Amino acid sequence: MGLYKAEGVVLRTRNLGEADKIVTFFTHDRGKVEAVARGVRRPRSRLLGPTQLFTYGRYLFFEGKSLDTVSQGEIIDSFRPLREDLNRMAHASYAAELVDRSTEEGDRHEGLFPLLVAVLRLLAAGDELALVMRYFELHLLEELGYRPHLAGCVRCGQQRAPRFSLELGGLVCQRCGEADPAAVPLGEEAIHVLRYLQRAQPERLGVLRPSAAAMAELEAVLPPFCAARIGQPLRAMDFLLSLRAGGP
Ligand SMILES: [Zn+2]
């Protein structure tokens, strides 16, 4: 049993016993790591800050037989607005749940860690939260090997492809769309935004000002596509939608 250091983000925490917590991290080098933070619920615990939800930090772990232990933490960015603003928190929770549900412990995902950090940074400071989430979904899918095909019809290659098929994993033309009656119609603007998001760097999202109609179309496509690929419904998405509808 050894020690290891890792940069990570806190995805989830749950109480254990009187004073401990089990913390789920997503780390750069080891993917998802679950570790016990001992005594963290006692006043003045030095682990309290570094193990708060969504915190990005450097951690020192001890390997254990079943669960590892996190013994030290140093905050790189606490992403405090994500815990103080309900709307930001709801979005960050959704991002964290997506990562938690789509990865296994110890599975490395080279590109996913910087993507998660970049997206949390945008959710903490930006204002186009829904757009940031659509960006995250698209790039998460890509990291998981489900890159949506957006260059034309996924089946026949035809340029004009005005629907998105969750089943086929991309845009489909009118004719191929008949093979999947559940394919969702997308307007030109929504397709343009999708293609832009797929190739943009996260810091370039601000140049987009999509209409509410285009955003609604993308929301009908990407969250269900993620849920279908991950194979389970996402609780945090329901919470987000209920927030928008006027409170849970
Ligand atoms: Zn086609």
Image (tube, rainbow, N blue to C red):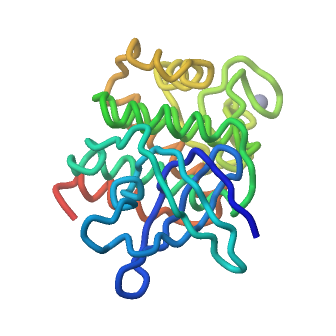
Q: Is residue 246 visible?
A: yes
Judged from the image, the quadrant occupied by ligand 1 is top right
Eyeballing the image, is 152 above or below 26? Answer: above
Which quadrant would the N terminus be assigned to in this image?
Answer: bottom right
Residue 38 shown left or right of residue 244 in the figure: right
Residue 84 shown left or right of residue 48 in the figure: left
Which quadrant would the C terminus be assigned to in this image?
Answer: bottom left
**Residue 121 location, x and y as percent?**
40, 33
Q: What residue is drawn where x is 81% and y is 34%?
A: 155
- Depth order, front residue of 68/155: 68
Q: How many marks?
A: 0
Q: Residue furthest right?
A: 156
Location of residue 82 by image quarter? top left
- Depth order, front residue of 125/157: 125
Q: What residue is drawn where x is 73% and y is 59%?
A: 106
Eyeballing the image, is 16 above or below 240? Answer: below
Eyeballing the image, is 15 above or below 6? Answer: below
Q: Is residue 238 visible?
A: no
**Residue 153 location, x and y as percent?**
74, 28
Location of residue 53 by image quarter? bottom left
Residue 71 shown left or right of residue 87 in the figure: right
**Residue 123 location, x and y as percent?**
36, 36
